[in-house]
Each structure stands twice: as C-alpha cells, then as structure tokens.
Amino acid sequence: MTNDTYGLKYIIVKQDTLLVQFYGSWEVSDDRRPALDALKSLHQKTRLKKVEFDTRKLSAWNSGLLTFLLNIHAFCEKHNIEMACAGLPQGAERILSLALAVPENKNARSAPEKVPFVDKVGIWGLGQISAAAEMMGFIGEVSIACLKMFKGSARFRMSDLLLFIQQCGAQALPIVTLISLLVGLILAFVGAVQLQMFGAQIYVANLVGLAMAREMGAIMAGIIMAGRTGAAFAAQLGTMQVNEEIDAFKTMGIDPVEFLVLPRMLALVLMMPLLCIYADLMGIFGGALVSIGMLDISAVEYYNQTKASLNLTHFGVGVFKSAVFGILVAIAGCLRGMQCGRSSSAVGEAATSAVVTGIIFIIVSDAAMTIIFTIIGI
Amino acid sequence: MQKIAPKIEIRDLTMAYGDFVIQHDLTFDIATKDIFIIMGGSGCGKSTLLRHLVGLKAPAKGQVLYGNTSFWEALPQEQEKIMRTFGILYQSGALWSSLTLAENVSLPLKEFSNFSDTQIRELVSLKLSLVGLAGFEEFYPSEISGGMQKRAGLARAMALDPEILFFDEPSAGLDPVSARRLDDLILELRDSLGATVVIVTHELASIFAIGNNAVFLDPETRTMIATGNPNTLLAECEHPTVRSFLTRGEEAE
C-alpha cells in the first residue's frame, strides 16, 4: 500500500520478522483494510514470529495511526506473533500501552448474534404477547385506581386536575377551532361538487352536519388530543421516570397511577366531549361559509336544513365516541410514559409511541363503535 | 424518638437483568444504627443492590429480610408497611418537579400522618432548615442548584422520621465542603433519630469518615469480596482489588 504523502511498507527482515515502515503524515484516517489484508497474506506465505516498527520517516500521527496499531496488535495476539513496540514514537507507544492496560471485558460487549428468521418471528411474537400483557396490567391498575376514586379514597391533588383541565381544555381551543373549521370547509367543498350536478346543493348542510356530529368532530378532536396532550403526558411521565421521581412515589407508598395517571385521564375524559361539541359547531360553521359564499344558499336556509337533518342522537353518538377517545388517548399517553426507559432518547420514543398508539386506538375503536351503532340502529 | 430500627439481612441475593447477572450470592447483615456502606467500582451494581433493598426491583434469587419478614415474599400490605419506614435519597434528588420544595416535603406528611396544616407547615420548615434550605419553601426544583436539590431530597427523605435511610451516591456532584457537611448530617441523623443508614458511594473520604460497616462488590467476579468496617478493611484486607480501591490504586502500582 503506497501513497504519495503517507503510507507503509512491509519488509521481511531475517526470515520470520516483519518490519513495518511508516512514512509521511498519518493524520488522516481512511480505510486500512487493504494494509491488514496484505499483512494476513504475508503471514500465510511466511509464518511470521515477530513484528517490528520503523517510524523514522513518519512526520506526524494521530489516533488514526493508533487504531491501525491496535488492529495489528489484535492480529498479532491472534496468531501468537510477538509485537515489538520499540520502534514506535514514544508518545504512541505509551498511549498504546494505556489502551491495552485494561483487557477488553468480553461480557460487556454483547456480540450481535445472527438470529434465524423463524427465531425472529418467534421473538417478535413473544414480545407482542408481553406488550399486550403489560398493557392489560396497566389498564387493570387504572381500573383499580378509578374504583378507588369513586369510593373517594384515591390520592391525587385537585390542583393537578384543574391544571390538566386547563391544559387539555381551554388551551386546546385554538387548534381545535382551526382544524374543525377547515374539515367542515373541505367536506362542504367535496359534497358541493357532486350535489351541484343534481341541483341539490342544499343537502351540503345535511352532509356536513351529519358527518361532523357523528364522526369527524369526535375523530378530529381525538387526533388533536392524541398529538397534543397524549404526547405531552408521555413526555411528562417519561421524564419523571428518568429522574427517578416515579420511584420516589413508589417507595413513598404513593401509587403513581393514582397520583399521576388518574388526574390526567379524568381531565381528558371530562374535556373531550366539550371539545367534540365545539368541533361539531365549528365544522358546521365551516360548511355554512362555503354554502353561503359559493352555493348561493342563505344563512337561514342552511340553518333550517341543518336543524331538520340533525337530532340529539347524532350529537350523542359523537359525544359518546369522544369520551371513549379521551380514555384511550389518556391510557396510551400515560402507558407509554410509565413504560419509558431511563434515557432522554427513551422519552422521545415514548412520546412518539404515545401518539401512534393513541391514533391507532382512536381509529380502531371508532370503526368498532360505528359498526355496532349501525347494527343496533342508532 | 428512639426507635429500634429493624435489622436488615441479605441472604444469597442474586441480581440480574434478564439473563445478565449483575451480582450473585450476596449475603451480609446490616445491624441497627449501622452506617453501612455499599462500595465498589463503577458499574458493579451498587445502585441496583439499593433498588433491591428498597423494594423497586425483585431479586432473581435470594431474600432481603427486614426484622423477621422476607420483603419479597411478603404481602403487598406488609411490603407497604416496611417501605413506610424508609427514607430514600435518590442519586439525582428525584424531587417531584411539578411541586415546590415545601409541597415535596409535605406530600408524604399529608398522606401518611394526621398532623394539622399548621403542624405540617412547621415540620416542613424544620426539615428544610435542617438541610440549610430555610426560606426556599416556595421554590420549584428547577429553580435551585443540583446540590440544593440533593439536600431538599434529603429533607423529603427525612419527612416521616424514617427508621432506615438509604442514600444513593449522596456526595456525587457536591463540593468538598458540602459533602463534608452532608456526612456530618448523616452522623447526626443516626445519633439523634437512631436511624440505620445505608449508603451507596465510592467517595473514599466519606467511606472512612462515617462508615462503620461495609460490603465491597467486585465487578469482575460479580459477587461480594469483602465485608466489615472500612478502616479495618484498609488495615487488614488482603484482597488486591479491595486494597487498590481503598488506596485509590496507589498501593497496587
């Protein structure tokens, strides 16, 4: 391996001693494998017993040289070759012996084992089972805490509850306003194009009203809360896990599920229906804007048509769904927070996974509820 | 105030994360009113041992006995009763970040005692002034320095006049003078409250100044290799790892 500015030469001196001659400036660190491969094939040809170094032509070096020397050292140790460090620059020799002073802890480095595909599937399956068991356990703990709350013996602070109500209620209004107004607008646009072909544009009011009240209001509020509040819960609890604050609760004899999870869940369950109704109204208002502005429908006509097409049951369905979503988002957020590992990256993962879990819960449970409501005819 | 704190016995304790054994076959006693030091090189499982003692992590094998009760075989109610006698200072302080210092210290008092609000307020001021934090009642943990957080954590650990105090690296991150003052405070707590103290540390100064019993965990063999008074160990123990630890490696050279 030769290069204009730096490099090395292998010279066989005597019959089983190799002299490694370094020259130039070894301050760059590029791939040394060719040099090591050359050493290997040299060793195969002539059984080496000793490696010596000549660094008189070496002008400068840094850790790049040292990593290469460590590679040579490992090679020498494997093949029982003596490595004479005398020819190295003094500093390099000392640092090298420092690096080799503490032998590598073979237990600490867990070698990435090659796992066959079938094993991987099995491990994945077992992981899913234990994850499901963990989730059921958490839901059980939350249920016990809820029971305690109804008996009036749950320990949490009222001020925490009020704070969470403010955070996931009033402070969420701006974003709920924006999103649900736009969803109403979009629904109206999509409907208008089709209905105009039949001159039935007045039914935009039915479309928007029904869609918002039964589905979209609850889903939109739910998804916003999953992204906003669920992630926040996971990050808060995760950080507390990292700081050992949750341990402190446990050893103090205070159940963290009661003290931390219950007020968060209660706040979400209380606020979600209100947010849902608000989102419904905003969506209907968005539909009205499109109808009045584009379809020549007067505000009174739109209002009357909406009123005729909707009844309380429709709103009831949406509100019920939103309460369920509130529970699910809170469970997803708090579960991921409590499961959080003990590092800052784990907090990020917990927040991400809280949002993903929350949204999956929302969509799956919505599908289930919609099917059930359709079958029983609500 | 003089209570007879229970004796702690550790029997054949093996600690593991999954298949990875941290320490095996630990057997030692912590006597009443001991200042017991758990020492050993970094990463040997000192803090993990503490987590086993305070009830946060179940052992892979073996027993932790408080008095005559085996903690990990006891009913949850009994476990809670035993844990109620603990005061724990965590490595990072672990103050509840959403509560002020006063609320941090008063929360256990509110939950587990029948004191009136005035009594609790007075107790909180007392505990905070004991650790030199009088006047910081309304501060949040994020508003004070790391050393102060640690002291506030100690105030919280002392809130219920515990019989056993656990300290996880109490002097890490403290300046030498504060560390010394903390040592004095620990001695004072033992003498005046009659508390048993268990400390995880590798601060040699503290180990020799306050410890009267100790166990040495070895990361290489993954078990305990010495036990006894640290000063006696320094004088008599022959094991090279223990010797080099207690002399900062100077003798081994």
Image (cartoon, rainbow, N blue to C red):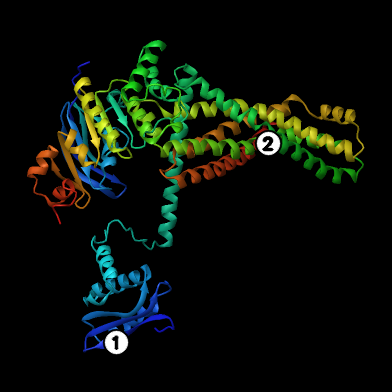
- Location of the C terminus of chain B (image quadrant): bottom left
Q: Please state the horizontal and vertical placement of residue B194, each as a whole percent of the image.
A: 20, 22
Residue wearing tag 2: A175
Return the residue nearer the eye: A109 or B19.
A109
Return the residue nearer the eye: A60 or B222.
A60
Query: Which chain does the numbered disc 2 sit on?
Result: A
Q: Disc 1 versus disc 2: distance between alpha carbons?
A: 73 Å
The amino acid at mark 2 is Ile
Residue wearing tag 1: A11
Identify the residue at image location x=25%, y=63%: A98
The amino acid at mark 1 is Ile
Tag 1: Cα neighbours inside 10 Å, few (<14), some, or many (≥20)? few
- Location of the N terminus of chain B (image quadrant): top left
Mark 1 element type? strand
Q: Quadrant of residue A219?
A: top right
Query: Which chain does the numbered disc 1 sit on?
Result: A
